[in-house]
Amino acid sequence: MKINSRNKGASAEREVIGLIEDHLGVRCKRNLMQTADGGHDLIGLDGWAVEVKRYKSATPAVKEGWWQQAVRQAKDVGQKPVVLYRLDRSYWRALIEVPGSYFDQEDFRCVADIDAELFFAIAREDLLSEET
């Protein structure tokens, strides 16, 4: 059975919205104008331009492409890029920039591929620091 990639992507975005709400108590929404505006997938997580990917598998080169897209979109809105992704039969993971990197943000060598739970802990700290 062939799965419609648009439906798979929309389902993944809804799943991530639920995870963000569960872990951070933040209500996000899908960016339905992203195709027209060229924007990131989810709106509402302050400070972060969230790109969501759901694929069967991904090589490092594919992940690098995701990162390049996320950086471009994040720069357009003045936020930090994050790619939340899940491969088939796997858990959610995140691509984020390593703080204090020696490389430009676009350079994939500055990216950490981390568990989504760790990303939520980092995002929680960011949200708390904004409140003070």
Image: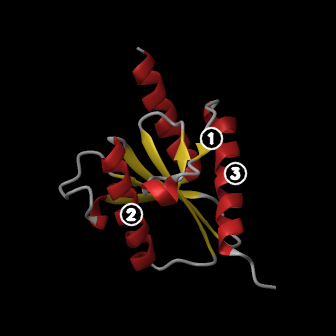
> Does residue 54 sit above or below 58 in this rendering?
above
Extreme-right residue of the structure: 1
Extreme-top residue of the structure: 132
Residue located at (61% from left, 33% from top): 24
The three-letter code of the residue at mark 2 reads Gln
Residue 70 located left or right of residue 24: left
Label 2, label 1: how many angstroms apart (C-alpha)?
21 Å
Q: Nearer the viewer, mark 2 or mark 1?
A: 2
**Disc 2 designates what residue?**
69
Indicate which disc, 2 or 3, sits on the residue closer to the N terminus: 3
Q: Nearer the viewer, residue 44 or 62?
A: 44
Q: Nearer the viewer, residue 92 or 21?
A: 21
Indicate which disc, 2 or 1, sits on the residue closer to the N terminus: 1
Q: In which quadrant will I find the C terminus?
A: top left
Evaluate whether residue 125 shows in this view: yes
Evaluate whether residue 94 shows in this view: no
Within 10 Å of the Cα at label 1, are there few (<14), some (14-19), or many (20+) other Cα atoms?
some
Label 2, label 3: how many angstroms apart (C-alpha)?
20 Å
> Does residue 52 sit above or below 121 in this rendering?
below
Residue located at (69% from left, 37% from top): 22
**Disc 3 designates what residue?**
14
